[in-house]
Amino acid sequence: MLKPLVNIFHIIIFSLLCFLSTVTYANKWTKIAPGIEYIDINDHSIINISHIHVFKINLKYNQLQLAIGKELFNRPAFIDEFAEIKKSLIAINGGFFDKSYQPLGLRISGYKLFNQIKGISWWGIFYINNNKASITNIENYFPKKGISFAIQSGPRLIIDGKIPSLKPGLAERTALGITKTGKIIIVVTNNNPLTTTALANIMKSYPLNCKNALNLDGGGSTQLYAKINNLKINVTGFSEVSDAIVVNSI
């Protein structure tokens, strides 16, 4: 009886070592394409269904664009549909929308204005001007010819390195951040609901190191589709959305 028990023990130890090595790998930045790195900040549980998917984007090699459902399909759509038609590397849900799936707040893509700014003080604006990403409030946003991309949403999670007072409440989250070196951070949770404060702390801390961050639409709208070489992720949502943020190589 002793030999079978020893064999079972060895199998258990081997399985645990494989699991721990997987966790270690998953929590290191991995380059998956020029100017794109990926990390999965998971819950370290044996049943590994909880994820915080994070991408780091370098605008020298990649660009952000909006995909508007009514422009492409004449209807709202799921994120994998946006990803397929835009042939994107990464696609996530965008900002808020009304009952008729009309986007709420500023939307600019390819230097074209798709939706006007909305006067909500606690929302922020993530925009790219002359290939530099910024996040600001409506009072300090000034339209310029060099703005190629913009999306308005809220709340702002990190403001110049500081986390503001945020409301409680757990939900699946989608967010955009900017590091001190100007890289763009994309965060999407999967079976891992967070408060906005918890999300802000994760984005501010190592290894994300965001100086500024903006919350996007979440809950049932949170979705992600990524297909880059050997990496494929499909986080499905409960509802169609009005628009998507897509990442393509330049």
Image (tube, rainbow, N blue to C red):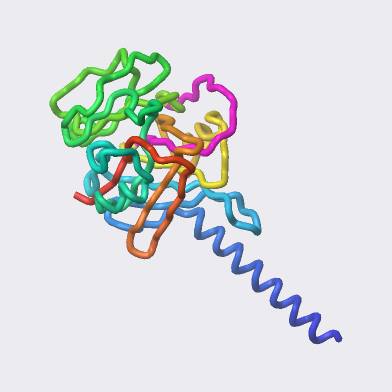
Q: Is residue 161 above or below residue 185?
A: above
In this view, the residue in front, 152 or 100, is: 100
Q: Position of residue 65 (x, y in %)?
A: 25, 40
Question: Quick one: 100 or 6, which is closer to the camera?
Answer: 100
Q: Main secondary structure of the magenta part?
A: loop
Q: Which residues are magenta?
A: 161-180
Quarter-wise, where is residue 149 in the image?
A: top left
Name the image quarter holding residue 77: top left
Query: Can I make out residue 7 in this image?
Result: yes
In the rendered image, which quarter is residue 198 located in? top right
Q: Residue at x 39, y 29 (%)?
A: 96
The furthest residue to the right? 1
On the image, the x and y values in percent for residue 163 come to 49, 25
> Which residue, as the protein is rendered here, is positioned at the far left?
145
Tell me the quarter of the image containing the N terminus.
bottom right
Residue at the image position 38 percent from the left and 45 percent from the top: 78
Is residue 232 highlighted in magenta? no
| Residue 234 at x, y percent in the picture | 43, 53
Pick the residue in front: 195 or 237.
237
Q: Residue at x 18, y 33 (%)?
A: 130
Tell me the residue at 38%/38% (across/down).
241
